[in-house]
Image (cartoon, rainbow, N blue to C red):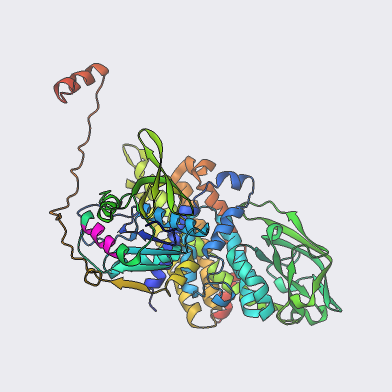
Amino acid sequence: MTQPVEKILVAFKSVPDPYEAAAPGDSGSTAKSVINPFDEIAIEEALRIRERGETSEIVGVTIGPSSIDEQVRAAMAMGVDRAIRIDDARLLDPYAVARILRGVIEKEAPQLVLMGKQAVDDDSNQVGQMLAGLLGWPQATFVSKIELLDNRTRARCTRETDAGLEVIDVNLPAIITADLRLNEPRYVSLPGLIKARKKPIDVQTCQQLGVIVEPLTRLSSTARPARRSAGTRVESVAELVIKLKEEAKVL
Amino acid sequence: MDFSWSDQQRELLDAVSRFGREQLTYEVIENDRNAVFNHDAWKKCGEFGIQGLLVPTEYGGLGQDPLTTVAALERLGYACKDNGLLFSINAHMWTAVIPLVFNGTEAQKRKFLPGLCDGTLIGGNAMSEPNSGSDAFALATTATRAGDKYILNGSKIFCTNGPIADMLVVFANVDKSRGQDGITAFLVEKGAPGFDPSHKIEKMGVRTSPMAEVFFENCEVPAENLLGKEGGGAFLFTRSMTWERGCILASAVGSMQRLLEKCIRYANERKQGGQSIGKYQLVASKIVDMKLRVESARHILYHYGWVAGHRKAVYLEAAMTKLHLADAWVKCAEDAIQIHGGYGYMTEYEVERELRDAIGAKLYSGTSEIQRNIIASLIGL
């Protein structure tokens, strides 16, 4: 059932600030959180589509406890019309996230769903694909350009692949995941931030959505990678070759 | 007093840090050499909300308190190496925006403040004259009422933003026989007949902030551009200067923090005599002094911001803040050069520029000597 785009849903995740992230294993970290940079690109794309007059509404959705409300407000400060936070503090795997998002999408009925290609904290790169599978919708992943065609019922997407720039058309509704080069997100202005404080956050639970999820994967531990030991200096090329042969055994 | 940030303050200050880091880290060496003002960065700061931090929301500002404002400017100073841009923004905020907020008519505020907040308009003031600096109220520029206009004659010097300004708050005397009580402020707009702000002045530091000598030759100013009352200029100027003294070096605290971190990095990397120079006590001691100076500068700044948000009379605190921060910034920049040795003296290392940028702080907005006079008079001397 194809309808022209009227509502875009953008899914975003709160992740540790890549500029100030604490090292794994650091306890009591006070590291700041930000919107996952790829999701920020997805939000920016939705804003640009709205600025071209090709959608009338943008709904943001994220999953997490109230401590991520600052990122929800940041999304609204960028220009998302309203935001939904699914209140769930559990560590969710991509399949659980996709199933929750499916619940939101069935309720909101957007014609286009945008999100980053992956989150920079767990690098799973699965939610968009799983969500398309669960919904039976077409998907375009790693997208660096989006054009809406045929009275906004089809999206022409450019993907960056090993073979070059691949152009594919997907009928809407569809899931599109954003790559780095899709756009450069705008910064959150202070007037936008202050206005966003007045917009309510729509907090919902999985129960209200009628979605029962139990993560299929469990985090067993996180550890700091082993430190690299200091190298040694060699006097000559001949000595290097001997060491590579006898000590490193790579020759 | 309580300096812990509320969630809203922290969110705002984090946004300023991020904006500075992502939008204002352009190269400055060439712009400094050629005395080029970065209009694009000015516009970005306006759109982001810097120029309107203190302005009430009904006029396009953000209605923030003085403490949040100085802390935001400190973060901007830390992220942005272009001290000239920050100097221009400060001149604009304290000498054009503040007088309008406190003394503008409703019509004047509606006409100018939204543009002054969002980066579309640039403001400044014109007070100092070739023969009146520290003795500011001895100014010779005159204003004569002629029907629905005033006619201004005279010249002004050291006019920050002069060559790029859309409007200046100009001080002139309407009746010299009244002395200080004749001083009156006017809003002079770019293009006013007989107004010439085109004579640029070359200077030692903050070179990316344009400065002009400004001439008024039978300059016509509509009567509705009278700012405040006739004879109210001295009071208006004093209020504007008090704000400026308290806030103008907020960004310098950020600059000092940046210099401190740069010195620590360099002292750890630079090896002489088989060890990092930071291991030599004479170098370490200098850096410890820098750290103390930055912290005490930040404390006196935040204290000023807090006091300014809680009571009216902040004349003493403003003078102490200005005096302390100017001295601290100059000393910090000088020590930073010493720690970097010969490299610190070279343009490429971007340490010498900080010293050139800092030194003016002992001169503008009242010299350090004037600040000492003010403080002395206020503590009973």
Residue placed most toward the observer, B274 or B122: B122
Residue placed most toward the observer, A175 or B298: A175
Asked if residue A19 is positioned above or below residue B6 in the image, the reply reads: above
User: Considering the image in quadrants, where does the C terminus of chain A appear?
Assistant: top left
Bounds of the magenta segment: A96-104
Direction from residue A212 to residue B358 in the image, left or right: right
Q: Residue B64: say if magenta.
A: no
Asked if residue B350 is positioned above or below residue B274 in the image, the reply reads: below
Asked if residue B326 is positioned above or below residue B82 in the image, the reply reads: below
**Magenta-drawn stretch, dominant element (helix, strand or loop):** helix
Query: Is residue B381 at least partly visible in the picture?
Result: no
Q: Residue drawn 52% across and 56% down?
A: A52
Q: Position of residue B94 (x, y in %)?
A: 60, 69
Q: In which quarter of the view is residue A131 placed? A: bottom left
Direction from residue B339 to residue B358 in the image, left or right: right
Q: Position of residue A240 (x, y in %)?
A: 23, 21
Direction from residue A59 to residue B228 in the image, left or right: right
User: Considering the image in quadrants, where does the N terminus of chain A appear?
Assistant: bottom left
Q: Position of residue B283 (x, y in %)?
A: 38, 49
Query: Is residue A25 at least partly visible in the picture?
Result: yes
Q: Position of residue B333 (x, y in %)?
A: 49, 53
